[in-house]
Amino acid sequence: MQAQNAINNTVDTAEQTVPVSDITQIINNLSSYLPESWQPYWDQVQSIPMLAFVVIVALGYVMAKIGVMVFTKSLSQITKRTKSDVDDQLINVLRKPFFLTIFFFFLGMAVKTIGLSTGLEKTLIRLLASLLVLSWMMRGFNVLRILLDTLSRNRERFEVIQPKTIPLFELVGKILLIGLGSYILLTIWGINPTAWLASAGVIGIAVGFAAKDTLANLFSGFFIIADTPYKVGDFVNLDSGERGMVTHVGMRSTRLLTRDDVEITIPNNVIGNAKIINESTGRWEKSRIRIKVGVAYGCDVEQVCEVLKKVGESHSETVDEPAPRVRMRAFGASSLDFELLAWIPEPVLRGRIKHELHMQVYAALNAAEIEIPYTKQDIYIKEFPSNQA
């Protein structure tokens, strides 16, 4: 029995002499950093755990305040040289987590002085570390928003980041921050994140297969907004036959308003792989229309050009620059083929102006007594069949 008690006492002694944590070592060595005249007072403070707790917490609060002040002043001297206020916003956002980092460090040291049980002590320290991680994560969301807003205003250098693509970048950034924060939290609480990552990967694959069409539309919408082949108000033609004015460009679909005043919703995955003719872009938004005219052989071609050009110039909605022009295109089977080329302010006006020009061309040619040929068939009867009784 005596031998067994000796063994137990030895084990207990060994357990008590296990190396302590880094925070505890800092507390035990804290007295070595103090002036010699302060050593007796510190020893007395250490002899009363609650007093040591209060002193360290108060010291931590003061040190955190000083640290934030130094952090703010130092960076403010640098930010004064910049014209943008983004750095000032970032400093204001990061002040609180920086303060909490210093204060929680001292608070963790203060917890070590109370003499709690090992399990409760570890739980409190882990809780403090978790709160600190959550604080940095929430401030990370604010930093992400400030950076995206700033980059979206500088479109010349960052064409991909625009006001309409900010929600996608913000979502991806938040997911990454949450993933990183969750990984750190699991590590703090002693949970192996490998199994969780594997499960998340399997779930991500399943969700990807289930929502592949939705994801395809989202990614296509992102590239459409980033590449901007068209924008709201543009008049576009698709190779599938749709033609109209773009009324909405979203992350999932694009809407076109046709000339029949019917709105068509096209998934971005479809329109992203289609051939798009944007009539509102180029050197300008003006659009050229062509009026094909055929006149009879024998007509004065100079007169025809003059009449057609006058019709193009007299219309109130054709532009002066570029000026209307007339071109003779071919010697047709039964006519001389001409084209009146005129520019209009907007592609959406094409249908109505072409209608008006066709009518004015017809009236002008009739007034000038210029014949417009049309298909005619003459039937010649060589002989009538004889009447046989």
Image: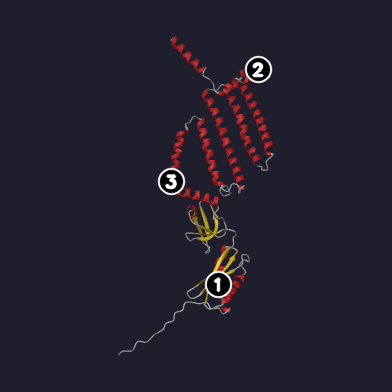
In the image, is residue 44 above or below residue 340? above
Residue where numbered disc 3 is placed: 209
> Which of the marked residues, 3 or 1, is nearer the chain's N terminus?
3
Where is residue 118? Give x, y as percent: 52, 23
Q: Closer to the camera, 327 or 261?
A: 327
Which residue in the protein does label 1 denote?
A: 358
Task: Report which residue position mark 2 lands on.
Answer: 39
Q: Residue furthest bottom?
A: 389
- The spot of residue 115 in percent (x, y) is 56, 21
Q: Mark 3: which amino acid? A: Phe
Residue at the (45%, 48%) spot, across then down:
212
Circle 1 — which element?
helix
Checking the image for residue 6, the label placed there is none
Q: Is residue 206 left or right of residue 82?
A: left
Which kind of residue does numbered mark 1 sit on? His
Quarter of the figure with residue 128: top right
Q: Establish if 114 lies above or below 155.
A: above
User: In this rendering, does residue 208 appear at all?
Assistant: yes
| Left or right position of 167 against 69 | left
Circle 1 Cα neighbour tier, 10 Å, few/some/many (<14 / 14–19 / ≥20)? some
Of the numbered discs 2 and 1, the one sitting upstream in the chain is 2
Between label 3 and label 2, give the one nearer the viewer: 3
